Image: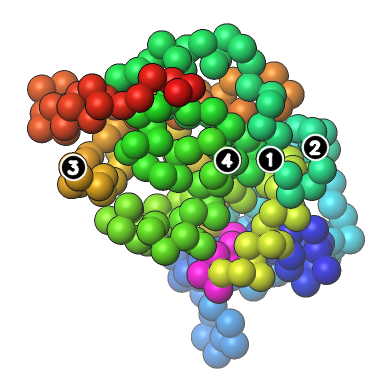
Amino acid sequence: MARDGTQDDNRLGSFLRSRRARIDPASAGVVDSTRRRVKGLRREELALLAGVSPSYYTRIEQGRDRHPSWEILDALARVLRLDDTERTYLRSLVTPPLAPAGGSAGEAVAGTVRPGVLTLLRRWADLPAFVVGPRRDVLAATALATLVNPAWSPGQNLIEFAFLDPRARQVYPDWEEIGRQAVAGLRATAAARPADVDTFVAHLRERSDTFRALWDSHDVYERVTGAKRLWVEGVGTLSLSFETFALAGPEGHVLYVYFPLPGTEDDAALRALAEGAPPQGS
């Protein structure tokens, strides 16, 4: 079994197969009157459109050549109409992975957030903000973050909460989209940091059919900014924007900061919630 819980360990080939299945042959300029057994481009069609020999492309997709040049990857990406995130992911599949962040597989590294980052979180009493590791374990958070969303509490895991906690579908009014984005983002991380993520993915695949189906779709997505609706007990639904910041260092930590638009009802509601938040660390 593969490190990510699938039946093969050929990530590059699996991703390429999933992407060529999305391409309509006619829209790619392929003229074919024969009956197709599967949707999407055939291997030889993709190879010819990308200027690669069909036999060599077959070797790549079957995992017999796992280090094609970036020029070949770029040609395949062009035909497959990959977006910037997917192109980055495609390249990461042939790049040596990063070393694990530390700790044993499947264990959150809770004590590694830098003191300066913790100081910032203590000073941001009026904002929901938190730090996660590669598996999306919440390692540190502002007190307000834990009030807005139970998933944002230290010791929680964003992915496990979304798929295994019965509160998730109430907390996230747009749960389907949240779940899709969460899995696609985790896949982007898994390519670069398999030692940190693979065992965790296998664990979730066993426990959630929905997670397994989304993971097996091979979608890749990195949302560094945006907005999210959250249901907050005693408050109702809040609409908050967010920004993410990759923290320099080998740990792979990411800082999330959520905020309302100034002057909105969400702004007033969050301020009222912050006034009742306990001091950080109490």
x, y percent for residue 165: 47, 60
Residue 216: within the magenta? yes
Report the residue marked by disc 4: 155
Residue 277, by quadrant, is top left
The alpha-carbon separation of the residues under discs 4 and 3 comes to 24 Å
Q: In the rendered view, tell whether residue 210 sits above or below residue 75.
A: below
Report the residue marked by disc 2: 103
Of the two numbered discs 2 and 3 in the rendering, the one whose residue sits closer to the viewer:
3
Magenta-tinted stretch: 209-218
x, y percent for residue 172: 32, 53
Tell me if mark 4 has few (under 14), some (14-19) or many (20+) residues whose alpha carbon lies within 10 angstroms of its own. some
Of the two numbered discs 4 and 1 in the rendering, the one whose residue sits closer to the viewer:
4
Q: Residue at x 69, y 54 (%)?
A: 200
Residue 60, by quadrant, is bottom right
The alpha-carbon separation of the residues under discs 4 and 1 comes to 8 Å
Label 3: element kind: loop
The reply to whether dot 2 and dot 1 touch (C-beta < 8 Å) is yes
Q: Residue at x 51, y 11 (%)?
A: 119
Tell me if mark 3 has few (under 14), some (14-19) or many (20+) residues whose alpha carbon lies within 10 angstroms of its own. few
Tell me if mark 2 has few (under 14), some (14-19) or many (20+) residues whose alpha carbon lies within 10 angstroms of its own. few
Q: Along the horizontal axis of the image, is 279 left or right of 82?
A: left
Report the residue marked by disc 3: 235
